[in-house]
């Protein structure tokens, strides 16, 4: 059984996430306070931690830095959580070597499970560089309602083809999407 630390300030979101992770048979440790999150991480050694940027006492970024310095916590993979998407926050999360960055506004509870499982290496994913000149790629993008020029609407970078294994259906089933190497 995998153990997840969910340190999120917003009660409603924290409880909703807790619920879905329990259904997926995770052991859930939850708190809205930074110090408690650090204590839980040291004592319980979760397999993964979801840390809110806006925790009281110690924020998620600061916690992530503390985690990296302590022997007992430095191997815990961290997913940074925030309610609002801010480009500089995403960048900071990556600089501090967070494993992922998720925003409440753009992610459903089911999606959060998928993202965490990817971090845990339980849901294999592949990212492939593709050319927009390939007819099959053009067709696929049209099919999935993406911009036909294969560029990210936020930063303009070339999108990559992303395959994520859908374990619920078996090893050879993948969910296909196009993702930005900078923004996703
Ligand atoms: Zn982008």
Image: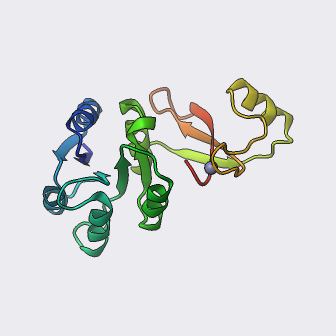
Q: How is the image coloured?
A: rainbow
- Residue 13 in view here: yes
Could you say which is closer to the camera, residue 147 or residue 118? 147
At x 42%, y 46%, the residue is: 102
Position of the N terminus, as image quadrant, is top left
| Left or right of 63 on screen, residue 132 | right
Q: Image check: 77 left or right of 18? A: right
Q: Using the rendered image of the protein, determine whether residue 121 is visible from the camera's viewpoint.
A: no
In the displayed structure, 168 sits above or below 26; it is above
Say if 60 sits above or below 148 in the image.
Answer: below
Total number of numbered discs in the rendering: 0
In the shown orientation, is residue 5 left or right of residue 152? left
Q: Residue at x 19, y 57 (%)?
A: 34
The answer to whether 97 appears left or right of 40 in the picture is right
Please state the horizontal and vertical placement of residue 100, each as a whole percent of the image: 44, 52
Residue at image position (86%, 42%) is 133
Q: Position of residue 171 (x, y in %)?
A: 53, 35
* Relative to 78, residue 168 above or below: above
Measured from the top left, where is residue 178 in percent x and y?
A: 65, 39
Whole-percent x, y for residue 170 in the image: 50, 30
Is residue 157 depicted above or below 140 in this figure?
below
Tell me which corner region of the image, top left, top right, bottom left or bottom right, holds residue 42.
Answer: bottom left
Q: Residue at x 29, y 66 (%)?
A: 62
């Amino acid at each position: 059984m995998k153990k997840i630390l969910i340190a999120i300030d917003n009660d409603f979101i924290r409880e909703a996430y807790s619920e879905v992770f329990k259904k997926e048979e995770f052991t859930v440790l939850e708190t809205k306070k930074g110090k408690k999150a650090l204590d839980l991480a040291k004592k319980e050694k979760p397999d993964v931690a979801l840390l809110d940027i806006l925790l009281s006492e110690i924020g998620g970024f600061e916690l992530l830095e503390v985690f990296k310095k302590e022997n007992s916590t430095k191997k815990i993979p961290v997913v940074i959580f925030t309610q609002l998407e801010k480009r500089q926050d995403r960048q900071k999360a990556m600089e501090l070597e967070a494993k992922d960055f998720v925003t409440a506004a753009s992610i459903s509870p089911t999606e959060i499970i998928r993202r965490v499982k990817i971090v845990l290496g339980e849901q294999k994913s592949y990212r492939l560089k593709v050319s927009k000149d390939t007819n099959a790629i053009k067709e696929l993008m049209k099919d999935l309602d993406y911009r036909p020029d294969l560029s990210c609407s936020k930063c303009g970078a070339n999108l990559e083809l992303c395959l994520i294994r859908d374990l619920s259906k078996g090893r050879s089933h993948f969910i296909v999407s196009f993702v930005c190497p900078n923004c996703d």
